[in-house]
Image (cartoon, helix red, strand yellow):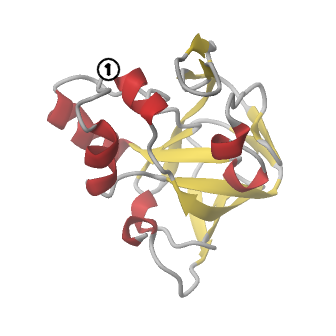
Amino acid sequence: MAEVTAICVVAALHPDPGSVGTTAIDKRPVSGPVRIGEYGAFADVQADRKHHGGPDKALYVYAQEDADYWAAELGREIPPGFFGENLRTVGIDVNGARIGERWRIGEKVIVEVTSPRIPCQTFARWMGEDGRGWVKRFAQARRVGPYLRVVERGTITAGDPIEVLTVPDAPAIRDL
C-alpha cells in the first residue's frame, strides 16, 4: 500500500552563495497532523519561489525507494526531508507518475502532479557535491521526484494512504 511516511517542513534557513542568498532546503519531519493548503505544508518556506514554490510547486515528493538508492550510491543515510522534500513516500512510483495525475492523500487532500524537480546548484552545495557533477548525476538517474499542486486542501499525517485517482495519457516524470 502506498503511503506518506513523513511530512517535512523547513527546519532552518541557511546562507547560500546562490543568487537568492539563502536556502530553505533544510526540511525535517514533523509529528502529528499537518495542514496542506494552496502553497503546501503549513509552516514550510521556500526561499526561492521562482523555482521552488507557488501553487504549481506547492509540495515536493520523494520516495523512500529512491532515497535508498541514493543512500547506497553515496554511502550515507538520506533521512526524510534531506533532499528538500515535503513528503516522503513508500509504495508508489513517484517518478512513474504522469503530469496531471491526481492522488488522494489521507481522507481529503487531493494533489496533482505538475512537473519533475530540476536539480540545481543549491541542492549540489547542500549535498556537499558541488563541483562533482551532482546535478547531472541526480537528473540522469531519473529519480528526481515530482512537484504537486494542491487541488483539495486538508490535513495529512505520516502513515496516511496515497490513492491514485486519475492517470492521464501524458509523459511520466522520469521521461521528461
Q: Residue at x 62, y 19 (%)?
A: 21
Q: Residue sitting at 77 percent across and 25 percent down?
A: 43
Q: Residue 109's image quarter?
A: bottom right
Q: Type of residue at label 1?
A: Gly
Point out the image quarter for the C terminus: bottom left
**Which element carries disc 1, helix, strand or loop?**
loop
Give how far across and how far down residue 16 sits, in percent.
54, 17
Horizontal arrangement in the rendering, residue 144 relative to residue 33 (left or right): left
Answer above or below: position of 100 versus 88.
below
Q: Nearer the viewer, residue 18 or 5?
A: 18
Residue 93 in sight from this viewpoint: no
Q: Residue furthest bottom?
A: 169
Q: Is residue 90 left or right of residue 17?
A: left
Instruction: Judge the density around disc 1: few (<14), some (14-19), many (≥20) Cα neighbours within 10 Å.
Output: few
Q: Looking at the rendering, in which quadrant would you find the N terminus?
A: bottom left
Q: Position of residue 96 (x, y in %)?
A: 41, 68
Residue 74, position in %: x, y? Answer: 19, 30
Q: Which residue is mark 1?
A: 128
User: Image height check: is 96 above or below 32?
Assistant: below
Q: Is residue 150 above or below residue 16?
A: below
Of residues 47 and 75, the one drawn nearer to the viewer in this rendering:
47
Does residue 57 lie above or below 15 as drawn? below
Q: Nearer the viewer, residue 82 or 32?
A: 82
Residue 49 visible in the displayed image? yes
Q: Residue at x 40, y 23 (%)?
A: 125
Question: How many marks are shown on the rendered structure?
Answer: 1
Q: Quadrant of residue 121?
A: top left
Rendered location of residue 67, percent (x, y): 33, 39
Residue at (46% x, 39% y) in the render: 120
